[in-house]
Amino acid sequence: MPLSNSNSTKPTVSKLIIGEANKKRSPAMTTTGKTRSTARRRVAGVATAPKSPVAIEDIEDFSPSETLAIRSSLLRWYDGSHRDLPWRMPITATGGDRNSEDPAAEDQRAYAVWVSEVMLQQTRVHTVIGYFNRWMEKWPTVCDLSTASLEEVNEMWAGLGYYRRARFLLEGAKVIAENGVFPRSSSALRSVQGIGDYTAGAIASIAFSEVVPVVDGNVVRVITRLKAISANPKESRTVKLIWKLAGELVDPSRPGDFNQAIMELGATLCSSTNPNCFKCPVSDQCLAFMLSRQRDNVKVTDYPTKVAKAKQRNDFAAVCIVEIADGLDEEILSDEHHFLLIKRPENGLLAGLWEFPSLILDEASMNQSMRRKEMNKYLRRLFNVDIGGNCKVVLRQDVGEYVHIFSHIRLKMSVELLVLSLHGGFSVSSEEDQSKLTWKCVNGDSLRKMGLTSGVRKVYNMALRFKKQLTHIPKQIPKKKAKRTTG
């Protein structure tokens, strides 16, 4: 049974029959229940249309002629058109004897590939280039990275998002450095935390010339178009099929270059919305392209099938930028003030990163007064900050709202600036488990240099802009009471 949406009207390989006037009966079933080799005809490696319905489980392997045609065309195109990126090794058009290379050089290549591939997950190439160069300058080897702290790594990663990737890089580097050798096969690489099938395949093929495939979103797009696979690309059977087909294509003499070539094709000519099929080196082998030229209701961009994204959760947070005026310095624009930062838990969203005091609240039931009451209770519980008691409010103003989008959460933040003059400074409340709470106060200069998440940076900049708009804030120094005289 085809793995496709029964309600979809999009033409699929299993429904498209070229030359409908000359329909033929389905071929006889084999003893295993699968159709014989009738799904596609091939002429010298060129794709031709199917003449009978094709279910996902009956999609055939690439023929030897197709495989050779795709390999040679794709590598020839890559050799002449690839982008120059800092993590790419020189192209080896003749294959080269990489087995004779210095193991230390191979390890260095593996480390560079690993860092780049992790950074490139969910992030565009032009953004990654600067981060990659700065990272490799600070930690040029896996051993150098293994000595870094999580806070240093998070600061370097700030702005790339998906911070768990950075933590896995650090943890993996520590394991590799402790073992004293970089894993040299895809199976061994998968034993390192944070390295999955794709990253293991990329490192093993590019750095160590292991003949293994890689499958990322770009490769999925290329393979599903080459075979016109209309099944849900997220379903396990389809995923296994794509990995199998990708493995058939890998060039045994240049596995790393081939894997980079097929990813490059998906990232450039074979894009998701605007493919340039007439410049594509493998268009002659592309069934989706052939069908699109024969049927008006078929487009190359129909493949892969679009899958509805999971609905985002809507959260609401009250964020309080707590600014502490030192001593009698209550000038709002002073650079001598300090800001309270709290470290998030080591597990979960944005694990181990710094943020301003924040509370997840029910937006529908919270007005400004109620939000402030909840924040007051939060600060009192954690730090013994008693608004109006052991501290004086110099300024308290809402500075605006900001919506930050995560992959699965739409977080709306109501941001306020709270400038306090404290009597005695901050201390963790006796009610709070000090082992579970990490906090610090930093001045404005230090805060600007920290590797904050893009959301926290945005909130801080909102407060800066608000303060600059204030032309004059009178210092709230209480008047001294006149002494009473007694007659």
Image (cartoon, rainbow, N blue to C red):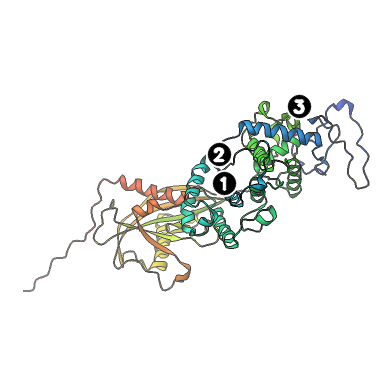
Is 340 left, or right, of 9 in this rendering? left
Circle 1 sits in a helix, a strand or a loop, which is it?
A: helix
Q: Specify the quadrant that holds the N terminus.
A: top right
Amino acid residing under circle 1: Ser
Circle 3 sits in a helix, a strand or a loop, which is it?
A: loop
Q: CA distance from mark 1 to mark 2?
A: 10 Å
Residues at badges 1 and 2 in contact (C-beta under 8 Å)?
yes
Q: Which callout, 3 or 2, points to the residue nearer the camera?
A: 2
Residue designated by label 2: 85
Residue drawn at point x = 60 percent, y = 62 percent:
179
Q: Is residue 99 above or below residue 324?
A: above
Q: Which callout, 1 or 3, points to the residue nearer the camera?
A: 1
Is 455 left, or right, of 324 in this rendering? right
Is 476 left, or right, of 107 in this rendering? left
Residue designated by label 1: 116
Quarter of the image for residue 368 reads bottom left
Mark closer to the chain start, 1 or 3 = 1
**Residue 297: in sight, yes or no?**
no
Residue designated by label 3: 295
Q: Is residue 347 above or below residue 125?
A: below
Quarter of the image for residue 385 reads bottom left
Q: CA distance from mark 1 to mark 3?
A: 40 Å
**Residue 437: in sight, yes or no?**
yes
Pointer 1 local density, CA inside 10 Å: few below 14, some 14–19, many at least 20: many
